[in-house]
């Protein structure tokens, strides 16, 4: 761990759990990690695209935000 940085907590969500979070309107950021071309074709409702991990701090400045990432293609 780098000095001054906290380690984030990670957990795996099943598809049904993610759907329930979306349906309830839970407060979280849904992030698609595939290339922008795949995102433009299809993505989950409310998702934002992050295909450049170097932009994480810039796109998500709230260090306390719950961020859910996924990287499925719908093919």
Image (spheres, rainbow, N blue to C red):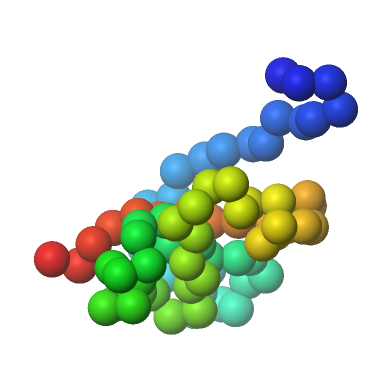
Viewer-proximal residue among 65 and 54? 54
Q: Residue drawn at (35%, 58%), measured in percent from left and top?
A: 34
Quadrant where the N terminus sits is top right
Q: Is residue 14 visible to us here?
A: yes
Q: Quadrant of residue 32?
A: bottom left
Image position of 6 (left or right of 69) = right
Residue 64 position, x and y percent, is 78, 52
Residue at the left extreme of this rendering? 75
* Above or below 41: residue 13: above
Image position of 59 (left or right of 35) = right
Q: Quadrant of residue 7?
A: top right
Residue 69 position, x and y percent, is 48, 54
Residue at the right extreme of this rendering? 4
* Above or below 11: residue 59: below
Quadrant where the C terminus sits is bottom left
Image position of 6 (left or right of 21) = right
Q: Is residue 17 visible to us here?
A: no
How many numbered discs? 0
Viewer-proximal residue among 70 and 38? 38
Q: Residue drawn at (78%, 50%), measured in percent from left and top?
A: 63
* Above or below 39: residue 7: above
Q: Residue drawn at (58%, 47%), measured in percent from left and top?
A: 54
Residue 46 position, x and y percent, is 50, 79
Residue 14 position, x and y percent, is 37, 53
């Amino acid at each position: 761990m780098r000095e001054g940085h906290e380690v984030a907590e990670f957990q795996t969500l099943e598809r049904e759990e993610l759907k329930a979070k979306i349906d309830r309107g839970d407060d979280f950021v849904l992030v698609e990690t595939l290339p922008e071309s795949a995102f433009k074709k299809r993505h989950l409702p409310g998702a934002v695209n992050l295909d450049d991990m170097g932009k994480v701090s810039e796109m998500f400045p709230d260090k306390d935000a719950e961020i859910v990432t996924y990287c499925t293609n719908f093919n």
